[in-house]
Image: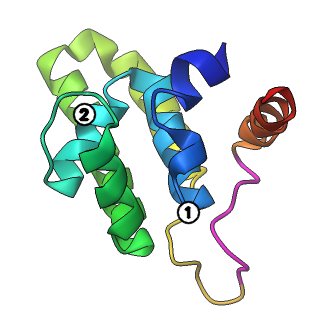
Amino acid sequence: IYRRKYWNAIQGDQIKNQALADIILDGQVTHGAGIRLLQEVLGVTVDGIVGPETLRAINTADPARLYNDYKERRRKYYHALVEQNPRLGVFLNGWMNRLARFDDYPPSAGSSGPSLAGPITFAIIFFLIKSTS
């Protein structure tokens, strides 16, 4: 299900930077608007489809800047959802906690890279995705 519905939708096999693929996949799984938010950040046509234009923009962007800008765009998206519909406020802490599991990129001093320890689920999913392809 994850491969067909989410990984393939973001063209995960074609994204050169794994940290970007991870956070983009998380955005798509979490709120379905992940591709549109990504396209806004990239400044490409916002159509919700990772086609050649979006994929080229992902793979030619500065990975650290795109990663951090996309993470911030998602943060703002969650807050806007709650502002538009205050009843969704009960989910805000969970959304923020999930997003916080993605360390800022580039890694801080002493870190070996963006932490995927938080989204351990994705390590399992990626193993399953790769092993079934």
Quadrant in which residue 125 is drawn: top right
* Frontmost residue, 103 versus 67: 67
Q: Is residue 42 visible?
A: yes
- Left or right of residue 71, residue 47 in this image: left
Position in image of residue 57 (x %, y %): 29, 58
Q: Is residue 10 left or right of residue 118?
A: left
Q: Residue at x 23, y 44 (%)?
A: 39
Disc number placed over residue 17 in the picture, else none: 1
Amino acid type of the residue that numbered disc 1 sits on in the rendered structure: Asn
- Of mark 2 and mark 1, the one earlier in the sequence is 1
Give the magenta-colored segment's residue range.
111-118
Image position of 52 with respect to 59: above or below: above
What residue is rendered at 41% in x and 17% in y?
A: 90
Furthest toward the bottom, the residue is 109
The residue where tag 2 is placed is: 36
Amino acid under disc 2: Arg
Q: Secondary structure at mark 2?
A: helix
What residue lies at 58% left-to-right and 59% top-to-bottom? Answer: 19
| Residue 13 locus on image (x, y percent) | 60, 44
Q: Is residue 112 above or below residue 2?
A: below
Quadrant in which the C terminus is drawn:
top right
Q: Nearer the viewer, residue 104 or 64?
A: 64
